[in-house]
Image (tube, rainbow, N blue to C red):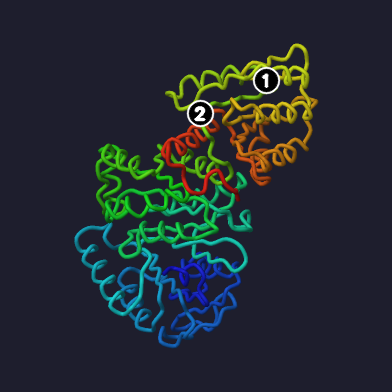
């Protein structure tokens, strides 16, 4: 149903003047990067950023599948209706001033949707930045600055957000930490198309390995649980549900004009539907990364490998504090003997495994391979610091090669002072789930185990399976 929204033959921008900083102009600038055919509607301009302009919506070519309406709320109503009557199937009115403003705005929004639907069109928004699909031939309707140049190819996680700002920040995080996105959708007021429509679409998209959502409210909670629950049996569905406090619920109402709902009821319903709920934006993005790049473990038994003893102690504390979601794996006698052979006599070969600061990259890889081979280990976390003199940059490629052939997750704690972010990106670019802090790495590990526990006795259809 939504194929022509994400892969339009031609995109029109209604209301672009060519002035720098004007919303419509910035939409055209973003769309030009994808290389798809464009058209612009403006009563006075002849071209906008080199794109030919027509005076009226009715003059648009017949192959326009998507129109971005960059006009005020009052003007957008008429423009959307005319575009729908022109048989343009999908419309994105970016303006606010609808249901989030009160009763009059809600009436205007209902009338807009009714008119567009009667004319055969569908609407994303209003009050939205639209959508973004990376790569050549992609679609980028965002009029705010974002890290488009750092995500050149499509990833395998779809991000659906009721907040444009949260979504754009997710793009930035995905860009600088090295994992791409399948697509980003800003729902806005979701007056017509909503989270259910997009979760269903990405659930049937073979290129999508997981769906992450930031939501403040539900249009139809029961339908969402049915749709997302069905998708969650095929691929992970993660949700950050905002508005969990009284103050948050009030903020939701002023932001989108919607009711937040009871957090306790929502949490229980998510568990029943096999949807993974997280408590913050970092946890949402870290979880999406881990689930996209790692197979799901068979259990909670974690082995921790480090060239720095302090982080081994902290890791043991983190596992002990996980509420039973993780436990330290009990290494077999054979595993410990092999670790002793592969390292120094003074290395600690119980779990956590401390190879000491004298460790080399070759020792780290050998130890990782030995831990993965132990049948008593379900997942492995490796602290990869390139600071010790024996550590070399090729450690990244070696860990990636081992991870590609492992049916157990390998997560990396990548810390290197001011170069931490770059090191994380290098690992993640190579296909390894890397995190800049122990807390975030442990949070991702716990989420992987939670995914398995949701399907205890009834394994999810595609896990463990191929990764992005």
**In front here: 270 or 452?**
452
At 45% from the left and 74% from the top, the residue drawn is 66
Q: Is residue 189 above or below residue 468?
A: below
Residue reaching furthest to the top: 346
Q: Position of residue 56 (x, y in %)?
A: 42, 85
Left or right placement of residue 212 versus residue 304 in this view: left
Q: Earlier in the sequence, mark 1 or mark 2?
A: 2
| Residue depicted at x 30% and y 54% | 256
Q: Residue furthest front?
A: 457
* Most foreground residue, 107 or 242: 242
x and y, in percent, of residue 3 in the image: 47, 69
> Which one is nearer the viewer's eye here, 70 or 365?
365
Left or right, 274 with respect to 143, comes to left
Horizontal side of residue 294 vs 266, given as left or right: right
Residue drawn at (56%, 19%), measured in percent from left and top? 314
Image quadrant where residue 138 sits = bottom right
Residue at image point 31% right, 80% down: 119
Q: Position of residue 412 (x, y in %)?
A: 63, 33
Mark in front: 1 vs 2 = 2
Residue 331 position within the rendered picture, expressed as x and y whole percent measured from the top left: 62, 20
Of helix, strand and loop, which one carries label 1? loop
Q: Report helix, strand or loop for mark 2.
A: loop
Q: Which residue is mark 1?
A: 308
Residue furthest left as drawn:
103
Q: Which mark is residue 300?
A: 2
Q: Are marks 1 and 2 in contact (CB under 8 Å)?
A: no
Q: Is residue 233 above or below residue 194?
A: above
Q: Quadrant of the N terminus?
A: bottom left
**Foreground residue, 174 or 39?**
174
Mark 1 closeness class: few <14, some 14–19, many ≥20 residues within 10 Å: some
* Label 2: few (<14), some (14–19) or many (≥20) C-alpha neighbours in 10 Å: many
């Amino acid at each position: 149903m939504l194929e022509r929204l994400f892969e339009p033959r031609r995109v029109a921008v209604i209301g672009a003047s060519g002035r720098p900083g004007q919303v419509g102009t910035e939409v055209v600038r973003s769309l030009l990067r994808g290389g798809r055919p464009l058209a612009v509607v403006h009563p006075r301009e002849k071209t906008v950023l080199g794109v030919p302009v027509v005076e009226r919506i009715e003059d648009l070519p017949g192959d326009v599948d998507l129109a971005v309406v960059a006009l005020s709320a009052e003007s957008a109503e008429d423009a959307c209706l005319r575009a729908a009557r022109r048989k343009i199937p999908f419309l994105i009115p970016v303006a606010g001033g609808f249901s989030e403003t009160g009763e009059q705005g809600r009436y205007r929004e209902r009338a807009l949707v009714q008119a567009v639907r009667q004319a055969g069109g569908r609407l994303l928004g209003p009050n939205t930045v639209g959508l973004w699909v990376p790569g050549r031939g992609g679609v980028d309707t965002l009029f705010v600055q974002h890290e488009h140049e750092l995500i050149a190819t499509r990833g395998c996680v779809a991000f659906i957000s009721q907040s444009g700002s949260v979504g754009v920040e997710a793009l930035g995080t995905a860009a600088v930490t090295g994992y791409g996105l399948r697509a980003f959708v800003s729902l806005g007021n979701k007056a017509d198309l909503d989270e259910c429509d997009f979760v269903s679409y990405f659930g049937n998209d073979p290129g999508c390995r997981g769906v992450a959502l930031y939501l403040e409210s539900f249009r139809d909670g029961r339908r969402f649980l049915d749709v997302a629950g069905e998708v969650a049996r095929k691929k992970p569905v993660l949700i950050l549900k905002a508005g969990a406090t009284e103050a948050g619920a009030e903020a939701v109402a002023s932001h989108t004009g919607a009711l937040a709902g009871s957090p306790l009821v929502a949490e229980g319903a998510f568990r029943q539907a096999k949807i993974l709920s997280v408590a913050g934006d970092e946890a949402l993005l870290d979880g999406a990364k881990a689930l996209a790049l790692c197979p799901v473990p068979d259990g909670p038994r974690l082995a921790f490998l480090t060239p720095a003893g302090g982080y081994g102690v902290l890791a043991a504390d983190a596992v002990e504090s996980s509420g039973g979601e993780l436990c330290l794996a009990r290494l077999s006698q054979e595993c410990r003997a092999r670790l002793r052979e592969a390292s120094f006599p003074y290395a600690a070969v119980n779990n956590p495994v401390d190879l000491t600061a004298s460790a080399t990259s070759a020792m780290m890889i050998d130890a990782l391979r030995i831990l993965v081979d132990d049948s008593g280990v379900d997942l492995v976390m490796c602290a990869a610091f390139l600071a010790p003199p024996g550590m070399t940059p090729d450690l990244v490629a070696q860990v990636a090669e081992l991870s590609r052939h492992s049916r157990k997750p390998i997560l990396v704690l990548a810390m290197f002072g001011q170069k931490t972010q770059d090191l994380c990106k290098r690992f993640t670019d190579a296909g390894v789930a890397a995190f800049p802090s122990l807390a975030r790495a442990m949070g991702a590990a716990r989420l992987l185990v939670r995914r398995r526990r949701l399907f205890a006795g009834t394994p999810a259809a595609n896990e463990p399976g191929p990764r992005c």
